[in-house]
Amino acid sequence: MERYILSVLVNNHSGVLSRIAGLFSRRGYNIDSLSVGETENPEISRMTIAVSGDASVLEQITKQLDKQVDVRHVQVLGNGEGVFRELVMVKIDAPQEVRAVVVELADIFRAKIVDVDTRSVSVEITGESDKINAFFRLVEPYGIKEIVRTGLTAIGRGNSTIHDIMNKK
């Protein structure tokens, strides 16, 4: 199974997210990650959807998305075609005797300490999944108390935009 990243421009209306998620659910496709936000045009939102499957699954998903009234454009971002990032906040068990090690690990990964308590440290880390998972593996022995993930966001590489690609069709 391969992982595919879809960048989908949709009309910024209530219910669009529900309809898109329902499309995946009805077809039995799992969404690995989903993030949605308004674009530079307040009438359009961008959905970044990570899905796993084979080429036929990707083809079915893109065809079904293209049929949706509120979908303006679907772009598949392959390896090397985009910049992919995720924001994660993680609360780590860090009493005084191990706090310095946890803070040092955060510094190595260019993470930011966002909260400190007597028994824990909360860290904000951004990056690709491999970086985030490597950080988790190193702090796991100290005890991960809680994780919050935004979901993957992506943008195409180079000067052209998703709007340029959409307008060429």
Image: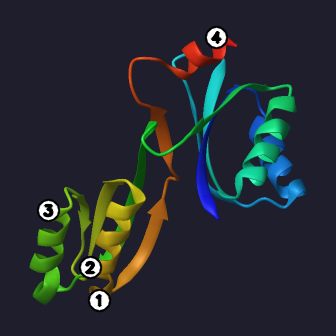
Which residue in the structure is indicated by mark 1? 141
| Circle 2 or circle 3, nearest the eye | 2
Q: Quadrant of residue 67?
A: top right
Among the two numbered marks 4 and 3 on one chain, the one whose residue lies closer to the N terminus: 3
| Circle 2 or circle 4, nearest the eye | 4
Q: Position of residue 101 (x, y in %)?
A: 12, 79
Among the two numbered marks 1 and 3 on one chain, the one whose residue lies closer to the N terminus: 3
Q: Position of residue 20 (x, y in %)?
A: 79, 42
146 relative to 14, above or below: below
Which residue in the structure is indicated by mark 3? 107
In space, the residues marked 4 and 3 are separated at their CA atoms by 44 Å
**Badge 2: how crowded within 10 Å, few (<14), some, or many (20+)?**
few
Which residue in the structure is indicated by mark 2? 138
Q: Secondary structure at mark 3?
A: helix
Q: Quadrant of residue 164?
A: top right
Amino acid type assigned to the residue bearing label 2 in the image:
Leu
Q: Are marks 2 and 3 in contact (CB under 8 Å)?
A: no
In space, the residues marked 2 and 3 are separated at their CA atoms by 13 Å
Q: Are marks 2 and 1 in contact (CB under 8 Å)?
A: yes
Q: Are marks 4 and 1 in contact (CB under 8 Å)?
A: no
Q: Position of residue 155 (x, y in %)?
A: 46, 33
In space, the residues marked 4 and 1 are separated at their CA atoms by 51 Å
Amino acid type assigned to the residue bearing label 3 in the image:
Asp
| Circle 4 or circle 3, nearest the eye | 4
